[in-house]
Image (tube, rainbow, N blue to C red):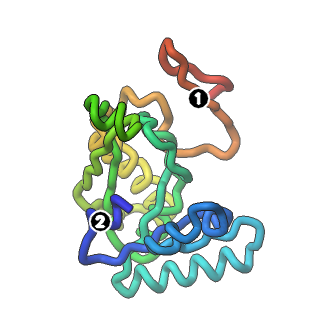
Amino acid sequence: ICVRRALRGYDPKVLVWDKNINGENGKMIRGVGGIPLPVNDLKAVSQCFKVIREDVSNGGWIHIYAEGSMWEFYQPIRPFKKGASYFAVKCNKPLVPLAFSYRKNGFIRSKIFKSPASLTLSIGEPLLPNLDLPEKERIEDLTRRSHDAVCILAGINPKENIYPEIFNNNERVDYYTTEYGIGYKGSW
């Protein structure tokens, strides 16, 4: 909702898992432009990608959580999947980095309204695909640059972020937060 409000005048679509469209927040997700991304039907995924490419090529906006999901009130920027960069490269359109950052609420918001934190949505400068690179490298380059841009928008030095820039399907790292800080299970 906050992304849609910040982009008033535009009608961004939001790519979401199909199970979220049918879940408890389904009406709200559809109301803010949710487009279901099917996960177990390759033909449906192909059709979804075709519709997205057409919409973006015709001047439409698509909002993608590059991390693959949204964890509320979690500040570190997790590895990005390449989907947002894929569409930007395929359609030769800019990618606009957005970042949420959080701050503690004062007494009234935290105690009366039971809100754990407030957020700030920061919008960065558009990033264009590097046309001097081959397509596969262009997607990876744009993914890395957008990850760094989102880190900076969130107030995190990209070199000090606890996660790598790009999601790796072959390795799993489960991070967790404790009262003593952030730890991890797994390996790089």
- For mark 1, does the 10 Å Cα neighbourhood hold few (<14), some (14 to 19), or many (20 or more) residues? some
Which quadrant of the view contains residue 61?
bottom left
Q: Residue flagged by tag 2: what amino acid is it?
A: Arg
Indicate the position of residue 44 as horizontal and vertical percent values.
70, 78
Identify the element where label 1 is drawn: strand
Q: Residue flagged by tag 1: what amino acid is it?
A: Tyr
The correct choice, above or below, for 30 with respect to 113 in the image is below
The circle drawn on residue 175 is 1
Q: Which residue is mark 2?
A: 5
Figure quadrant of the N terminus: bottom left
Indicate the position of residue 56 as horizontal and vertical percent values.
41, 79
The first of marks 1 and 2 along the sequence is 2
Residue depicted at x 29% and y 76%: 10
Residue depicted at x 36% and y 49%: 145
Q: Nearer the viewer, mark 1 or mark 2?
A: 2
Residue depicted at x 67% and y 36%: 172
The circle drawn on residue 29 is none
Is 37 or 58 nearer to us in this picture? 37
Q: How far apart are the two marked residues, 1 and 2, measured between alpha carbons?
A: 31 Å
Q: Residue furthest top?
A: 180
Which quadrant of the view contains residue 155?
top left
Figure quadrant of the C terminus: top right
Is 135 or 4 nearer to us in this picture? 4
The correct choice, above or below, for 186 with respect to 58 in the image is above
Indicate the position of residue 170 as horizontal and vertical percent values.
70, 42
Residue depicted at x 38% and y 87%: 58
Q: Are marks 1 and 2 in contact (CB under 8 Å)?
A: no
